C-alpha cells in the first residue's frame, strides 16, 4: 500500500537503495544486470544492498516509503514499453504533488546531464520543469547545449521556456539557445510562412538533434496553456468539446493520443509529435490525478521514453489502462 510522504522533498539515496533491493530481491535481477539497468557499477550495487540490509530497508520484505513506487516503476515500464520510470511518493496534500514530481525530475536530470554522451538537451516549459531546476545539483558541462524546444509566451515569465532554459544552462555551466518564435501563429497560413523561414527551419533542425528532451503537460482547465499561451480567439471549452484532454508542447491531444481536429493544432510553431518520437529519450514529468487522461494520451501516442510521476497518478494510469483492456475483451 502507498504511504504519503510528509515533507516536500525526496531522499534520492534511499530511493536508489529501494530500487536496487526490489530489482535484485523481488524481480530476480543479478547484481550485474541491476548495475547495467541503473547505470552504476556492480560494486556500488553490492554495497547498496548491504546498506539496505543494515538500515532495515531490506528484510524478508522491502520496508520503505519508496517500496510501492519501486513496484509501480516496474509495472509502468512493462505496461507501456518505457525505457525508464521514476515514481515518487504522493504527498498528503495533493496540491503539492508538483513539488515532489519536480524533485524526482531534478534528481533524474542531475544524473542524466552529467553523462557526456548527452551533448544537446531540450527543455520545454511549465511549473514542473521550472521547479525541477531548483532540485538539481550543479554539474560542470561546458560542452553541453541546453535548447528551448517550444515558442515563447508573453505571459507567465517564471515558467516560460526561455527562463527555464537559461536557469538549467547556468546550473550545468552549459551553453544555451532559444527558439525565438511565438508558440502559436495567427492562422494556419501564417504558420506555414513562418515555418518556411530559414532561421526557424535552422532552429527546428537543432531541436531535432537533441539526444534527450524534458516535457511537462497540463489539462485544459487551469493549465498554463489555458492561462498564459492560448491565442485569445481560441476557447478552451471548444477544445474540450472536440475531445481534447491536454497538450504536449502546444499540440492538443484526445484521450487516444491523437491530435484533435481543431485549428489550434494547425497553428503550432515548432516541432511535431512525430519529431519527438525520433528523439532517443523523451522525458515526460507530470503528476496529479487530473493529469491522468493527458499522460495516458501521451503514453498511447508512443513518443514518451521516460516517465516521472507520483504514486497515486501511477496507480491510476495502470487502473485506467486495465479498465480499457477489460472493456475491449
Image (cartoon, rainbow, N blue to C red):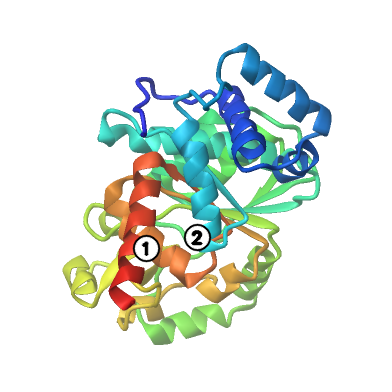
Which residue is the extreme one toward the bottom? 189
| Residue 182 visible at all | no
Query: Which residue shows up at 64% across the image and 64% down it?
Result: 207
Residue 307 appears left or right of 326: right
Whole-percent x, y for residue 145 in the image? 71, 49
Whole-percent x, y for residue 238 in the image? 19, 74
Which quarter shows the N terminus?
top left
Query: Which residue shows up at 26% across the image and 61% down it?
Result: 220
Whole-percent x, y for residue 102 in the image? 46, 37
Query: Which residue shows up at 21% across the image and 70% down it?
Result: 240
Say if mark 1 contacts mark 2, CB within 8 Å: yes
- Return the residue nearer the eye: 119 or 311: 311
Query: Which residue shows up at 55% across the image and 71% down it?
Result: 271
Residue 139 appears left or right of 238: right
Whole-percent x, y for residue 91 in the image? 33, 30
| Location of residue 282 (image quadrant) | bottom right
260 in relation to 289, above or below: below
Which residue is the extreme one toward the top? 54
Q: Earlier in the sequence, mark 1 or mark 2?
A: 2
| Location of residue 148 (image quadrant) | bottom right
Residue where numbered disc 1 is placed = 321
- Return the residue nearer the eye: 237 or 322: 322
Residue where numbered disc 2 is placed = 79
At numbered mark 1, what does the secondary structure look like: helix, strand or loop?
helix
Amino acid at each position: 500500500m502507498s504511504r504519503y510522504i510528509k515533507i516536500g522533498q525526496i531522499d534520492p539515496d534511499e530511493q536508489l537503495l529501494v530500487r536496487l533491493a526490489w530489482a535484485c530481491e523481488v524481480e530476480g535481477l543479478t547484481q550485474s544486470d541491476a548495475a547495467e539497468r541503473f547505470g552504476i557499477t556492480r560494486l556500488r550495487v553490492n554495497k547498496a544492498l548491504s546498506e539496505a540490509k543494515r538500515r532495515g530497508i531490506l528484510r524478508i520484505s522491502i520496508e520503505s516509503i519508496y517500496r510501492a513506487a519501486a513496484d509501480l516503476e516496474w509495472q509502468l515500464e512493462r505496461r507501456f514499453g518505457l525505457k525508464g520510470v521514476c515514481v515518487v511518493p504522493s504527498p498528503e496534500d495533493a496540491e503539492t504533488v508538483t513539488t515532489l514530481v519536480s524533485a524526482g525530475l531534478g534528481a533524474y536530470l542531475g544524473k542524466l546531464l552529467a553523462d557526456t554522451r548527452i551533448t544537446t538537451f531540450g527543455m520545454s516549459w511549465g511549473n514542473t520543469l521550472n521547479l525541477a531546476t531548483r532540485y538539481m545539483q550543479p554539474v560542470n558541462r561546458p560542452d553541453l547545449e541546453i535548447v528551448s524546444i517550444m515558442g515563447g509566451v508573453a505571459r507567465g515569465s517564471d515558467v516560460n521556456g526561455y527562463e527555464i532554459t537559461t536557469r538549467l544552462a547556468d546550473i550545468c555551466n552549459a551553453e544555451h539557445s532559444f527558439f525565438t518564435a511565438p508558440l502559436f501563429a495567427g492562422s494556419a497560413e501564417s504558420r506555414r510562412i513562418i515555418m518556411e523561414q530559414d532561421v526557424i527551419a535552422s532552429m527546428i533542425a537543432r531541436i531535432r538533434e537533441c539526444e534527450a528532451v524534458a516535457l511537462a503537460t497540463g489539462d485544459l482547465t487551469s493549465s498554463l496553456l489555458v492561462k498564459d499561451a492560448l491565442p485569445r480567439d481560441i476557447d478552451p471549452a471548444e477544445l474540450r468539446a472536440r475531445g481534447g484532454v491536454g497538450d504536449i508542447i502546444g499540440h492538443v491531444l484526445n484521450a487516444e493520443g491523437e491530435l484533435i481536429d481543431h485549428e489550434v493544432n494547425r497553428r503550432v510553431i515548432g516541432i511535431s509529435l512525430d519529431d519527438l518520437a525520433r528523439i532517443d529519450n523523451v522525458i515526460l514529468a507530470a503528476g496529479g490525478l487530473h493529469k491522468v487522461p493527458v499522460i495516458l494520451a501521451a503514453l498511447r501516442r508512443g513518443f514518451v521514453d521516460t516517465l516521472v510521476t507520483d504514486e497515486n497518478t501511477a496507480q491510476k494510469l495502470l487502473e485506467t489502462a486495465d479498465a480499457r483492456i477489460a472493456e475491449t475483451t
